[in-house]
Image (tube, grey):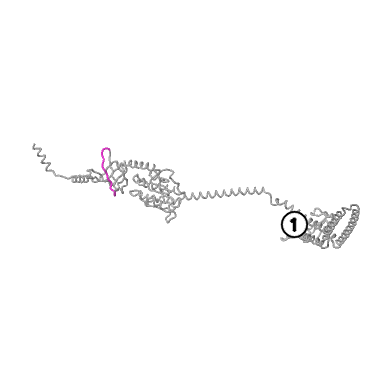
Amino acid sequence: MSHQVDMADTLSNAAEFSVSEIAQAVKRTVEDEFGHVRVRGEISGFRGQHSSGHAYFTLKDESAAIDAVVWKGNYAKLTFKPEEGLEVIATGRLTTFPRSSKYQIVIDNIEPAGAGALMALLEERKRKLAAEGLFARERKRALPYLPRVIGVITSPTGAVIRDILHRLADRFPSHVMVWPVRVQGDTCAAEVVNAIEGFNAMVPGGAMPRPDLLIVARGGGSIEDLWGFNEEAVVRAVAASGIPIISAVGHETDTTLIDYASDMRAPTPTAAAEAAVPVRAELVGYVDDLGGRQRQATRRVTATARDRLRAAVAGLPRAVDLVALQRQQLDHAASNLLGNLRHSVQSLRVRYARIDSKLSPRLLHGQRQEGSERLRNLSLRAETGLRKTVDRTRLTFDPRAGLLRTSVTRLVERRQSQLAGLGPKLSPAALKADLRHAHSMLAPLAARLRGGMASQMSESRAALTQSDKLLASLSYRSVLARGYAVIKDAEGNLVQQRANLSPGDAIAIEFADGDVGATIAGSPVIKKKPRPQSENDPQESLF
């Protein structure tokens, strides 16, 4: 009984604490005892940043869980952002949340729990971006064969930029623009994204030339060092670039996600420079070879065309042959023209002479008088006959005498009118008019005849003069006039060689002014000194 009283006294003497005091005491105890800790666990319940900018999730393992919070200011500085299901090592300080009496860790930094976790995250991100088609082969573009401007995104102080510049200078010197970035660390991804977007924002033809090709490069390193090039923002920027990109991140064995999104992956930065431009010497040699082949092909085509043209020309008739028949016909017509003109003029003269002899005024006057006399005689005879006929008819057929007389009178009048119409045509004035008309028709023909004959005579005279000059130039007499002679035998044949003569033969020597007879003697021939040949006398060398 006394023991129970002692216990009640003890409890009644203990200090009293409020809930807040107890919570604060626990908070101080936890924070003082643990301070900064590193906790390994799997992220669970992460749904992204809260509207306030903070991030809340849970770290758990097989048997326990602890709440975690990342304040807004720290979240932006995290190298690795929280992702659902990722095993990480979180560095921070333990504290409590008094309102719910829970303890939690306020995280300052997150890092993957070993390479395995990073690889798992990398594979998960790779599957996600591949599902969106960012790595599709049909999205990749061909690199420009000879870029005028090359943009390089890398660190300006490392060996990478020197290797790229040196290799470009060796192969094909080009205009290079460098956008300096950090190639590892917290700001690596953001700077690379800004560089890609900055190059794409340049205007073609502006003050700063827009690159035709981009190279994203850095040296080798661990997966943590290269993690900035695995960030989703960098991959999306590479895939959205309007300028072809060569990725050259790490060594040949290193692979990042931008290698899948870029248009070409180079194993090293030096290989990227080699892929960007051709070798200038090889290009010059290739162009020279093409030029030589082109010239050879041109010569071959020209030669073939020349041969075909020659073959075609050989198959065509000559121009002289084409007009030979027409020329012959023209010559024949020209040779016959003069004779025909003469014959035509002679015929006209004969006709004119015949007409002229018949149309003389005296002859025409006589013919007119003769015709008038014959006409009177015929009229008298007709009148006498008609009277006799009328008388006989009157005696025999008296009732129809009046009708017959009328018919005969009409017949006589008609004959008289016809004869009267011939009178004016046979008058001297009419005959003179006919003569003038015939003369007007013959005058042009006579003028043409005289012109043709004069032209023909002029041409014939010129041809004769030319032939005479040619004959004089080719005649041997012009040679005789210069002091030479022609020797003929007794029969008048030309003696051309000394062997054709014998002593005692009679010969005739023809000079320019006449012939002289001579006899061949038996004395030896005196050889005369050769006369020097004149340069201005080509016919002397002929004879």
Amino acid type shown at disc 1: Leu
Q: Which residue is mark 1?
A: 542
Q: Which residues are magenta?
A: 62-73
Image quarter where the C terminus lies is bottom right
Residue 305 place in picture, x, y as percent = 61, 48
Q: Which secondary structure lies at badge 1?
A: helix
Closer-to-camera residue (322/1): 1
Residue 245 place in picture, x, y as percent = 42, 48
Establish if 64 lies above or below 218: above
Residue 266 place in picture, x, y as percent = 41, 46
**Quadrant housing residue 23:** top left
Residue 110 place in picture, x, y as percent = 30, 45
Q: Residue 278 lies in magenta, yes or no?
A: no
Disc count in the image? 1
For this view, does 94 lie left or right of residue 144? Answer: left
Which residue sits furthest left?
A: 2
Image quarter where the N terminus lies is top left
